[in-house]
Amino acid sequence: MAAAEIPCVKLLDGTSIPVLGLGTWESKPGEVKTAVDAAISAGYRHIDCSPTYGNEAEVGDAIAAKIKDGSVTRDQIYIVSKLWQTYHEPDVVEDGLRATLKNLQVDYLDLYLMHFPIGFKQQSGLVPAHDANNQIITTDRDYVDTWKAMEKLVEKKLVRSIGVSNFNEEQVDRILTNCTIKPVTNQIECHPYFNQKSLSEHCAKRGVIVTGYSPFARPSRSWVGPDEPILLEEPALVVIAKKYNKTVANILLRYQIDCGHITIPKTVSPERMKQNKQIFDFKLEPSDISEIEKLNRPDGRIFRLALLSFCKNHKYYPF
């Protein structure tokens, strides 16, 4: 399939982004370079990264190799990365970006996101400082201050667009009220177990498009218990998939698209990459979307909040 078969959507700043990208969260070192190479060969042009994934340099190697062999040009690849929490102080925001640019071997990013609204005290680079109890030390740095520093990156043409990730409704509004450059996206966990309908609609009304991560609810998550449901095996989704002669994964990705979202499924399998692209020749009927939305659960969030329990009482905790 040609790259053009993955459509783009226009963002509120006038730039365009492919609605289907390759996620690289939890792609292991040693695998991710091959995965990015295969994705670009399969027609993917949107690659989602973060320095905290521990594999950004390999992503950069893969992109550089595909540019060098003539498969793509830099302007044909939409590269997304994120500002980590140890770089929230305004005077080091650019340092965080430049480390990512070096890893990815590019001069600019298409989209740069604030990964989380809470800052960490920096020990060195991505490493946060810890207290006497070995607990990460958070800061009271206002994410609006961090945002204003990110705006300067656009002015310097180091990034084309900026956005946020894991922000709640109030935090999105506070950025919009205090910004010069509006966030183009809010990247959040989104799948039928946790469909984020209220937050999605809130963002859409403000022109901020949702990018949904973990669209399959991370079936390979290491902490899944024997009684926890597996989204890809949900009977209702199996029925809908048969109706359209598609895979359940196709249905889950089409659901994101029909909700008006961008989606970034992670895979290192070239075959699954190709299968995941088979979503642009059909649309889900409203009745099927209604059935999918019935899967929403009060405890549907997959992201391990226990990892962030130390900052649960922080004034900027988003969940």
Image (cartoon, rainbow, N blue to C red):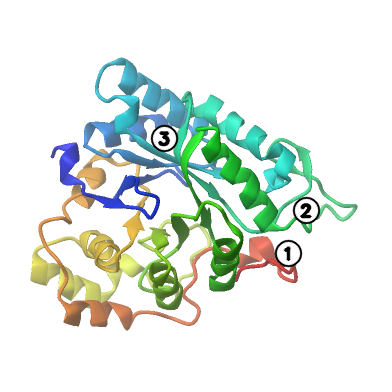
Q: Is residue 314 left or right of residue 290?
A: right
Q: Nearer the viewer, mark 3 or mark 2?
A: 2
Q: Which residue is mark 2?
A: 136
Residue pushed farthest front? 180
Picture layout, residue 96 above or below residue 204: above
Q: Which residue is mark 1?
A: 311
Whole-percent x, y for residue 195 in the image:
39, 73
**Which type of secondary structure does the marked residue at label 2 adopt?**
loop
Between 91 and 14, the one nearer to me in the picture? 14
Residue at position x 23%, y 31% in the image: 41
Sequence-first tag of 3 and 2: 3
Sequence-first tag of 3 and 1: 3
Picture layout, residue 104 above or below residue 128: above
On the rendered image, what quadrant is the N terminus found in?
top left
Tell me the CA gap for discs 3 and 2.
28 Å
Residue at position x 80%, y 55% in the image: 135
Between 306 and 14, the one nearer to me in the picture? 14
Give the number of marks.
3
Tell me the CA gap for discs 1 and 2.
9 Å
Contact, mark 1 vs mark 2 (Cβ under 8 Å): yes
Whole-percent x, y for residue 26 in the image:
48, 46
Whole-percent x, y for residue 21 in the image:
33, 46
Amino acid type for the residue under numbered disc 3: Val
**Which type of secondary structure does the marked residue at label 1 adopt?**
helix
The disc at residue 32 is 3
**Which type of secondary structure does the marked residue at label 3 adopt?**
helix
- Residue 194 in sight in this render: no
Query: Badge 2: how crowded within 10 Å, few (<14), some, or many (20+)?
Result: some
Q: Quadrant of residue 47?
A: top left
Amino acid type for the residue under numbered disc 2: Ile
Residue at position x 52%, y 57% in the image: 165
